[in-house]
Amino acid sequence: MSKRSQQTINTEQNRGTVSVIQGQASGATTTTSRPPGGSLQLVPQLVPATPAEGGGGGGKAKMKKTSGDKDSDEYRQRRERNNLAVKKSRMRSKQKAQDTQQRVNELKEENERLEAKIKLLSKELSVLKDLFLEHAHNLADNVQAPGAEGASPAHNNNNNNNGAFSSSGSSQR
Amino acid sequence: MSKRSQQTINTEQNRGTVSVIQGQASGATTTTSRPPGGSLQLVPQLVPATPAEGGGGGGKAKMKKTSGDKDSDEYRQRRERNNLAVKKSRMRSKQKAQDTQQRVNELKEENERLEAKIKLLSKELSVLKDLFLEHAHNLADNVQAPGAEGASPAHNNNNNNNGAFSSSGSSQR
DNA sequence: CACAATTGCGCAATCC
DNA sequence: TGGATTGCGCAATTGT
């Protein structure tokens, strides 16, 4: 399913050679396709030979199999193959983009997780440090004025201390 | 240098579908293009009127301004605008994809940084905890068997605590 | 040299 | 009415 049409426009300055063409079509080769409601008209058209081209050096006007050029034959086949390849390539490209996007999301999530963990650890750390200082003081006191002891027996080091100790916020970035 | 349209239709089995026609081109892409009268050779092309259109809708062969259709005039202008828009859109799309990719890299880097930080904090934490336990033991010993003091800070039997506490230094790259 | 994969481009349909 | 998107085919290039 495909048709063609072409145009060549040349864009801009073209140097050496270039040309552009165009076309449009429909169809899907493999499974389905077809624009839904669409309907258009077909334009049958034959192109008269389109000779021309002598090419630069000694070209001939004739081409054999290598190019029944443009009108049909292998050309068409090649086109179709290419179209297929293009489709495939594009699909892949798209997929890749999507994956990349997803990757971003995943990484973002992980980042958050890590940051949370850091926060937690920082808190724990600060608590411990405070405790440590306290002990130090107590010890000092003890040394100087023995008598009152029982400073802090139980160290609760567990994790769920989400309580609120104020804790210094060490944040840095 | 410039070529123009051609169309060929090829048949492949197709079914309701599209097709297009075209003709014309321009010499310059940018604004203004309108092939005036003289032009090079055009590909002989006639659009066969496809008589009988099957559609139900009453197609006419006539169109007025709304469509000097396809051959020139406004059409060309519209096309050109669209082409421009397309280009812009694609550029943007590409740019975006690139940005996304970069974002991935950045996030990846940040992740590593965060992980390193976590590692560091964890280490600090464990050191402190050990220190604590030791102190606790020492204290206990002291309580039970006073006499040998020296409970002060400096003894650590094993770990080489890299130094320390001292209020942290958050080091980050 | 052949052939698949990419890439730039214009067209047209559709979205908004 | 008009830009923005999107699917598609063509062709030139590039990679194998």
Image (cartoon, coloured by chain):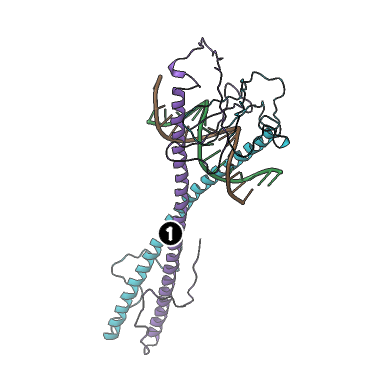
Chain colours: A purple, B cyan, C brown, D green
In the foreground, D13 or B155: D13
Report the front residue among A4 and B79.
Answer: A4
Q: Is residue A29 left or right of residue B2?
A: left
Give residue B112's quadrant in the image: bottom left
* Residue named by callout 1: A110
Residue positioned 53% across, 44% down in the render? A36
Which one is nearer the viewer's eye here, A16 or B63? Answer: B63
Q: Amino acid at mark 1?
A: Glu
Whether residue B154 is visible: no
* The N terminus of chain B - image quarter: top right
Q: Is residue D8 above or below residue A172?
A: above
In the visual, does B138 lie left or right of A116? left
Locate residue B173, reporting x and y percent: 46, 55
Question: Residue A127: horizontal and vertical position, in percent?
Answer: 43, 74
- In terms of secondary structure, where does tag 1 sit? helix
- Of B18 and B61, which appears nearest the observer? B61
Residue A121 place in picture, x, y as percent: 41, 68
Q: Is residue B167 left or right of residue A45?
A: left
Snapshot quadrant of residue B159: bottom left
> For the point 34% across and 82% down, which residue is it?
A154
Q: Provide the chain ID for the residue under circle 1.
A: A
Q: Residue furthest top?
A: A58
Q: Characterize the local packing of mark 1: few (<14), some (14-19) or many (20 or more) Cα atoms within 10 angstroms.
A: some
Up the image or down, A170 lies above or below B64; here it is below
Residue found at the very far left of the displayed protein = B145
Left or right: where A9 falls relative to A155: right
Q: Is residue A6 above or below residue A98?
A: above
Q: How many marks?
A: 1
Tell me where residue B129 appears, x and y as whole percent. Answer: 35, 72
The answer to whether residue A28 of the structure is visible from this angle is yes
